[in-house]
Amino acid sequence: MLHLALMANLTLALDHDLLHRARVRAAEEGTSVNAVVRDLLSAYSAADRVGAARRRLVALSVSSAAGSGGRPLTGGGAA
């Protein structure tokens, strides 16, 4: 199945030297400045969701009736 995402264009005003250095580094890494910016924006926008999910998880663990019975949580199998 072919999945096509709708892309929007973004215009940025950057220092010429900064853009040049970014293009050189991206080329060295086999990518493009466009891909680098897209990845950075994706991670930047996901940070809010990760933080919110973490807060929900902590709230659920605090309000949960289940507990460890005083045993330390080790991440291993059932005690």
Image (cartoon, grey):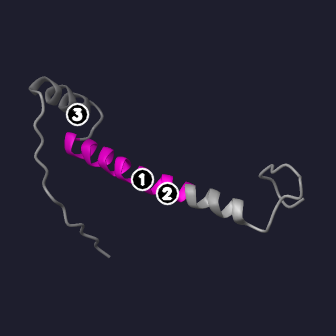
Graded by Cα atoms within 10 Å as few (under 14), some (14 to 19) or many (20 or more), the crowding at tag 1 reads: few
Q: Compared to 17, does 3 lie above or below?
A: below
Quadrant for the C terminus in the image: bottom right
* Closest to the observer, 54 or 74: 54
Contact between marks 1 and 2 (CB within 8 A): the answer is yes
Q: Which residue is mark 3?
A: 27
Q: Percent x, y for residue 3?
A: 28, 71
Picture quadrant of residue 69: bottom right
Q: Which residue is mark 2?
A: 52
Label 3 SS:
helix
Residue at the spot x=12%, y=41% of the render? Answer: 12
Q: CA distance from mark 3 to mark 2?
A: 35 Å
Label 2 SS:
helix
- Residue type, mark 2 in image: Ala
Q: Which residue is mark 1?
A: 48
Q: CA distance from mark 3 to mark 1?
A: 30 Å
- Residue type, mark 1 in image: Asp
Contact between marks 3 and 1 (CB within 8 A): the answer is no
